[in-house]
Each structure stands twice: as structure tokens, then as C-alpha cells.
Amino acid sequence: MPLQNLDHVNLRTDNLEAMVDWYQTVLGMDNGARPPFPFPGAWLYVGNQAVVHLIGQDQQINTVEPRIEHFALTATGLPEVVARLEKADVSYQAVRVPGLRVLQINLFDCDGNHIHIDFSPEEADAAGL
């Protein structure tokens, strides 16, 4: 039983509508089909894959330290992603991974979850980053 890949990330939020809007507007995900669970939530898709599952909470979630530091997505179309982030006025930091030259675009969603979007060295070179 070898593992193949990460299927999805599940995030709890007391800010469900804003989170759905953020993932749609900023990352271009689609709010799609979700099983009829007895609690509020949303599944956000990239193509046919629901990669971000949101669970709505009635009260604010209090944590001292997050148990997950970040989750990462791989993408192409670096100039379009940067333009989308800038249009949405989302702060980000572009960082090359030492030794791999992969470019990470680091950002935070509206609940403060750390995300990075990875681009190939070739695409980053072509974009001058």
C-alpha cells in the first residue's frame, strides 16, 4: 500500500462565507459538490479534485499554536497567479527553495492559514523571479 499523494486539506473556520469567497476569488477554486453532512461547510475544487474542505464552526476557534504550519499547492501560470493576488490586494512573498530553485509564493488566507504555491524553476526563471 504505497501512498500516492495528498488528497485534501480540511480547515475549520468561524468565517465560512468569507473563506469560500477568498478561495474562489484569490486562488480561483470552484465551490462544488459536497456530501450532505449535518454541519455547515464547503468543498473547494481544483478541476475535479476537492482540495480544500471547510467546516463551519459557530464560535471562534482559539489556538495558541497551529498544528499545521502550511499546506502547499503546485501551479503553472505564475504571471496570472501574481496578477490575481495583486488584484485582490493579497500580500505574498516569493521565495526560492534552496538547492531546488522551486519558487514558492507564500500567502495567508483570510483566516490566517499559511499556503504556498509552488512553481517550477523554469517558469520562475522565465518570469524573472
Image (cartoon, rainbow, N blue to C red):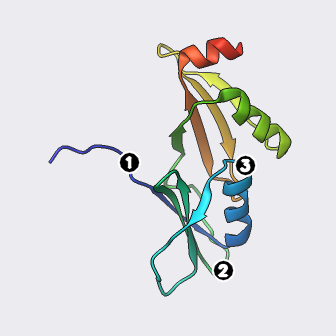
Q: Nearer the viewer, residue 95 or 61?
A: 95
Mark 2 element type: loop
Q: Is residue 76 at least partly visible in the picture?
A: yes
Residue topped by disc 3: 26
Measured in 3D between alpha carbons, the distance from the residue under mark 2 to the one under mark 3, in whole angstroms, is 25 Å
**Of the numbered discs in the image, which one, if any, rests on residue 6?**
1
Label 3 is placed on what type of residue? Val
> In the rendered structure, which disc, 2 or 3, sits on the residue that comes first in sequence?
3
Residue 112 in percent (x, y) is at 68, 54
Residue topped by disc 2: 59
Measured in 3D between alpha carbons, the distance from the residue under mark 1 to the one under mark 2, in whole angstroms, is 29 Å
**Residue contact at pointers 1 and 2, CB within 8 angstroms:** no
Measured in 3D between alpha carbons, the distance from the residue under mark 1 to the one under mark 3, in whole angstroms, is 22 Å
Q: Is residue 129 at least partly visible in the picture?
A: no
Using a 10 Å C-alpha cutoff, classify the residue at mark 1 as few (fewer than 14 neighbours), some (14 to 19) or many (20 or more). few
Residue 21 in percent (x, y) is at 73, 62
Q: Nearer the viewer, residue 65 or 102?
A: 102
**Residue contact at pointers 1 and 3, CB within 8 angstroms:** no
Residue 114 in percent (x, y) is at 62, 46
Label 2 is placed on what type of residue? Gln
> In the rendered structure, which disc, 1 or 3, sits on the residue that comes first in sequence?
1
Quadrant of the image occupied by residue 91 = top right
Using a 10 Å C-alpha cutoff, classify the residue at mark 3 as few (fewer than 14 neighbours), some (14 to 19) or many (20 or more). some
Label 1 is placed on what type of residue? Leu
46 left or right of 111 in image: left
Task: In the displayed orientation, state which residue is furthest to the left.
Answer: 1
Quadrant of the image occupied by residue 65 = bottom right
> In the rendered structure, which disc, 1 or 2, sits on the residue that comes first in sequence?
1
Task: In the displayed orientation, state which residue is furthest to the front.
Answer: 48
Mark 3 element type: loop
Quadrant of the image occupied by residue 4 = top left
